Image (cartoon, rainbow, N blue to C red):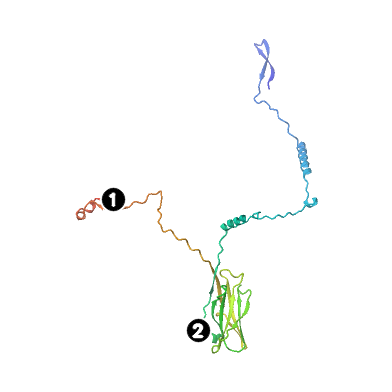
Amino acid sequence: VVIQIKQTLFINSFSNKSRDFRLIPRCSPVPRKRGASIYEETAEYMRIHFALAAGKRVSFADTTGGDLVDVREFVAFDSDDESDSAKWEHEQAKYRKPHREPTYSLHPEFQTPSHGALLHVVRKNKVEVEHIAPSEDDPLAFRGVIRVLNVSFHKAVYIRSTMDDWATYFDHPAEYVQGSHNEDTDQFSFKLCFAPPFTNHGSRIEFVVRYETAEGDFWANNSSLNYGVTLLLSYHQDEPAAANTEEQQIRSILKPPKAYRYVSQFPHCFTGCIPHFFQPRLFICW
């Protein structure tokens, strides 16, 4: 923007001349657009808001005669070709862990007395566990024999057992062993078995023996410790593959270490004549 001004100059106090000068200011003003007022901005916002709200409509499928739920089933291969099914089974077999059948073993947590000690305990306590052994037809079961003192003709023997630390228990009747009468003792046999969910490694059956007679009831509980049998599981590991007996040459970018051997330059007969500090030595590397 050029501003034109007039300035009167007085020269020699006699003459005056009028001249025009053009001065350019340091910062020229730049025209700017006037901003919208708050009223205009509010009006624009309300216009957009009502325009968007008017376009939204909510409707449900059942109001138009449709179903609210759509169920679809998917299969691995939508094909009846047997080759596709065989291929799918083959691919699954690659990532499926091999099924291993466990081997069960029973571990008694007590020792039965010997024959001489057994008769002494039976005459004292009237009843005692004679021995137990794993069942031949069931890996989860074991059989036992109870020796009782013949104090009366009418008698019965029960095995009270638990697998959940006496939260629950059951009384199993023992059977009389025919022909087991020996002097003043008789034998009864029983069978206990682990059952789900108590078939894991470390499951335990705890039991005591109750002997009912006309003279009263007698108990055998392993000196108040109870009788216990623990179930152990083991898996047969696959035999390791035969190792290759052929020696393979070791390759490396590093050089093998050097070996050193001492060789004397003088015969053995003269080395003794030369002082030790003066004997020359030669080291050979290979």
What element does badge 1 sit on?
strand
Quadrant housing residue 132: bottom right
Q: Amino acid at mark 2?
A: His
Q: Amino acid at mark 1?
A: Phe
In the image, what residue occupies the spot 66% across and 13% down? Answer: 10
Q: Nearer the viewer, residue 240 or 210?
A: 240
- Left or right, 147 with respect to 4, comes to left
| Residue 283 numbered tag | 1
Residue annotated with mark 2: 115
Q: Nearer the viewer, residue 111 or 232?
A: 232
Distance between the Cα atoms at labels 2 and 1?
Answer: 80 Å
Please tell me whether mark 2 sits on a helix, a strand or a loop: helix
- Residue 192 seen by the camera: yes
Q: Position of residue 179 (x, y in %)?
A: 56, 86
Is residue 2 shown above or below 14? Answer: below
Q: Is residue 243 above or below residue 168?
A: above
Q: Which of label 2 and label 1 is nearer to you?
A: 2
Whether pointer 2 and pointer 1 mark residues with C-beta atoms closer than 8 Å, the reply is no
Q: Residue at x 26, y 52 (%)?
A: 263
Q: Position of residue 266 (x, y in %)?
A: 22, 52
Q: Using a 10 Å C-alpha cutoff, classify the residue at mark 1 as few (fewer than 14 neighbours), some (14 to 19) or many (20 or more).
A: few
Q: In the rendered structure, which disc, 2 or 1, sits on the residue that comes first in sequence? A: 2
Res. 224 visible in picture: no
Q: Residue at the top extreme?
A: 14
Specify the quadrant of the image occupied by residue 24. Answer: top right
Residue 236 rendering spot, x and y as whole percentages = 51, 66
